[in-house]
Image (tube, rainbow, N blue to C red):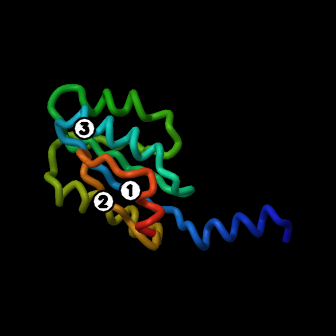
Amino acid sequence: MNAAGDRSQETEKHWPNIPIIVLNWNGLDDTRECMHALLQLDYPRFQVYLIDNGSVGREGAILESEFHSIAQITVLRLEANLGFTGAHNWILPRLLDEDYPYIALLNNDTVPDRHWLRELV
């Protein structure tokens, strides 16, 4: 195996891909700030699942427009507010099927330090 292949396996072993679930419900400004902070993480492998939980108005469409082209962010929209637990219960079975070693839940009004995920894993 070549050196690049060795590094790739080492990265997967030491830095597993981590999904981060962030719910938005009528918190556009907080959610934007949270997303921008997550994009500054020094952790090499993560995927944010940004779920608009039936926000009033155009918040879901705005978030989708702002973040849909960023590879580390998947924007999903729920038509109705399922509540905190309901929205997590909606997405968790999909992520559990992927056999991730960890799944992070982050409130949208959180601004994580850039080392947060690295230290957590």
Q: Residue at x 17, y 60 (%)?
A: 85
Residue linked to disc 2? 105
Q: Residues within 10 Å of mark 2 (few under 14, many from 20)?
A: some
What amino acid type should be assigned to the residue bearing mark 1?
Ile
Q: Which residue is mark 1?
A: 20
In the picture, the quarter occupied by the C terminus is bottom left
Nearer the viewer's eye, disc 2 or disc 3? 3
Quarter-of-image position of residue 116: bottom left
Residue topped by disc 3? 30
User: What separation in Å lies between label 3 and label 1 (alpha carbons)?
Assistant: 16 Å
**Mark 2 touches mark 1? (CB < 8 Å):** yes
N-terminal label among 2 and 3: 3
Q: Is residue 114 above or below residue 57?
A: below
Q: Residue at x 31, y 27 (%)?
A: 62
- The residues bearing labels 2 and 3 have C-alpha atoms spaced at a distance of 15 Å
Type of amino acid at the residue the image marks with label 2: Leu
Residue type at the position of mark 3: Asp
Front residue (pair 77, 119): 119
Quadrant in the rendering for residue 66: top left
Residue 107 pos. (x, y %): 25, 52
Crowding at label 1, few (<14), some or many (≥20) Cα neighbours within 10 Å?
A: some
Above or below residue 27? Residue 119 is: below
- In the displayed orientation, state which residue is furthest to the right: 2
Q: Are marks 3 and 1 in contact (CB under 8 Å)?
A: no
Question: Dividing the image into 4 quarters, which one contains the N terminus?
Answer: bottom right
Q: Relative to 86, is 76 above or below?
A: above
Q: Earlier in the sequence, mark 3 or mark 1?
A: 1
Identified at 38% across, 62% down, the residue is 94
Q: Which mark is residue 32?
A: none
Q: Which residue is pictured at 46% across the width and 53% down the height?
A: 47
Q: Looking at the picture, tell me which residue is in the foreground, 98 or 22.
A: 22
